Each structure stands twice: as C-alpha cells, then as structure tokens.
DNA sequence: GTGAGTGCAAACGCTTTGCACACAC
DNA sequence: GTGTGTGCAAAGCGTTTGCACTCAC
C-alpha cells in the first residue's frame, strides 16, 4: 500500500511538472521524465532511453523518444550535450550550469563548475565585441573508475 | 613564367609536406592541402572542400575528401571540430592550440586563446584526479560582421 | 469530439565502406 | 610490378518526418 501510495504521488507530481512545462501529460512523457529523475546525474542518449524503457516493459517508439527529448530540451527540463561526434546526450537541467569531464575510454561523465572560467569567458568575448549566448566546455580525460577499461 | 615557377615550387613544397607526414603525394591530397594553406584561418566541412574543388574544375570524389581529411587529421596536419551537431569542420593545425567563438546566426568562426583558462582547466582536472588529454571550448555568440544575417 | 501525441516505416544528412580500376614509388 | 589511393554506388548511423491511429482534456 505504501508503495502504491508512493507511486501515485510521484506520478501526480510528474504530471504536474509536465503541465507546468506546458506539455500534455502522456504516458511516454511521464516515463521518460521519471527515468531522468530516478537516475539523476546520469547522461543518456536517445538510444539509451529507448532501450531502458523497453527493458522496463514499456512500449515506446524510438521516434517518440526523440520527439520527447527535444521537447523536454526546449521546455528547459533537459539539456543536450555533444560529448561524442554525431550523437546527442541528455541530462536533467535542474542543477544549474556546469561543464564536463568526459572519459575518452569509457565515456564516463563527471560535472564541474568554475566561476573563474565563466568570468574569463565572458570577459574575453566582451573584448572581441561578443556576448556569450551559450557555451560548451568538454575536458576529455582518462578516468580511474573501476569499470574503466583503461584504468591505470 | 613567374607564375609557373611559383606553382611548381609550391607544388614541390606541398609534396614534401605530405611525405614528411608519411603520406604518398597524390593529386587529391595535394589539392586539399593547398586549399587549406591558401585559405589559412578558414574552417571547412568535407562538403565545403568538395564543392570548392569541383568549382576549381578538380575531379575529386566526396569519399576521397572524407578519407583525406581523416588522414590529415591523424597526421596532425588538420584539426577537427564539431561546432554544429552532426558535422565535422577542419582547420590547418599549424597555429598551435586555440579555442573558438562561433556565431549562432551565420556560423562565422573566430579564434582566441587564453592561458589563464588553459591553466585553470588543468588545475581543476588535477583536483579531480584527471589529466586533460584533449578539450573543446566553444563560445557561441552573435557576431557583428557585415555578412551576418542577424547583424545588430 | 477535437487537436495534440504516438508508433511505424520511410526518408534524411553526414559519413564510411566494398569493390574494381588507376596511379605513386 | 605491387600495393596504396581513388571514384562510384551502396550501406551505415543517428535523427527526423509523413501518415494513420489513439489518447488527453
């Protein structure tokens, strides 16, 4: 009963978040948003999301995943990244702006933020007569996680 | 005669550069390398290179352009960038490391370098136990060039 | 009920690859 | 001559789109 209660409450809350974002509360949208919320800090590609939902027994089309991810990005719920060429990766955009370390060997992503780099970027842009509208900073490293195939 | 002489000398020099890079000196490679050298500071996609060579009357296949660009990148002659999703852009890698301003409206690319940002990146990576193997920093701006469709 | 959302399959843009031919060394 | 390089067409991959059906409101 507690479980059922919990589920209902989370479900209702997610519905509310979708509506606040100006989106109709449909099953695919609810499932995808929940996936990102349950696995906070995670970075998923469209394919990752699709496979994960399939494994959960949810019957969602890949095209819908792409559509929903794009909508979520436009609604500000998710941010899109391009860690690897030719592939988008998404993360919950709740935690404010940050940059990323990306492991060249296993793809592991770690976040960081440095105000000094941010300030310096804006300062340099101003020097060139620009205003920074967006920016991407990826530091490619070799990580030291247990799971990393190139662990030192 | 002077022109012919100039051409021959440049041609010979480019041949030499190709061989130094460990590549056989073939016509497509010569033409592509020359294109980048003549238009230094330029950023080209594979398609750009292909079209430019076609317009010059050179008969080169698109597949060859892709192959040669990749070889040049591996040989260190060119660097590859991903300013836009799903598309590679190349530039002569002669001028040492630098970062880029990219105009969101017209795609214009401008280069910059800041030692302080470089140092800070390495310092932050070290703090996290990483060593930076490569990095990408793109500052997306709205430029003020004559040609820019969104010029202010 | 009505318009927005969905699944499927086909199309898309960029890039890579298989193959027969051509050329650099 | 030999093996690498090339052009062409076909295939690959991530992503988008057209269409008929379905669902949220």
Image (cartoon, coloured by chain):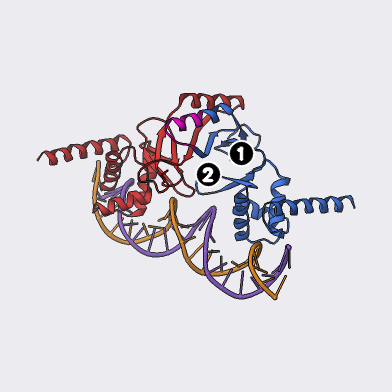
Chain colours: A blue, B red, C orange, D purple
Give the dominant element type of the magenta stretch: helix, strand or loop.
helix
Is residue A127 a member of the stretch shown in magenta?
A: yes
1 and 2 marks in contact (CB < 8 Å): no
Residue linked to disc 2: A84
Q: Percent position (x, y) of residue B85?
A: 49, 48
Q: Residues within 10 Å of mark 1 (few under 14, many from 20)?
A: some
Marks 1, 2 in one chain: yes
The number of callouts visible is 2
- Of residues B26 and A96, which is closer to you in this image? A96
Residue at horizontal 32 percent and vertical 53 percent from the top = B51
Residue at horizontal 73 percent and vertical 55 percent from the top = A56
- Residue B15's place in the image compared with B59, above or below, is above
Q: In this image, B110 relative to A4: left or right? A: left
Q: Percent position (x, y) of residue B93?
A: 37, 35
Q: Chain of mark 1?
A: A
Residue linked to disc 1: A108
Q: In this image, C8 relative to D17: left or right? A: right
Q: In this image, A42 relative to B25: left or right? A: right
């Amino acid at each position: 009963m507690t479980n059922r209660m919990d589920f209902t409450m989370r479900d209702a809350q997610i519905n509310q978040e979708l509506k606040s974002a100006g989106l109709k509360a449909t099953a695919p949208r609810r499932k995808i948003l929940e996936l990102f919320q349950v696995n906070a800090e995670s970075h998923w590609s469209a394919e990752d999301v699709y496979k994960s939902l399939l494994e959960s027994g949810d019957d969602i089309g890949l095209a819908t995943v792409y559509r929903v991810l794009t909508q979520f990005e436009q609604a500000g719920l998710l941010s899109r990244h391009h860690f690897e060429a030719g592939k988008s990766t998404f993360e919950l955009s709740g935690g404010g702006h940050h940059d990323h370390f990306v492991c060249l060997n296993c793809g592991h992503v770690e976040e960081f933020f440095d105000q000094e780099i941010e300030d310096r970027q804006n300062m340099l842009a101003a020097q060139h007569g620009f205003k920074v509208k967006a920016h991407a900073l990826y530091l490619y490293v070799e990580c030291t996680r247990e799971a990393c195939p190139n662990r030192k």
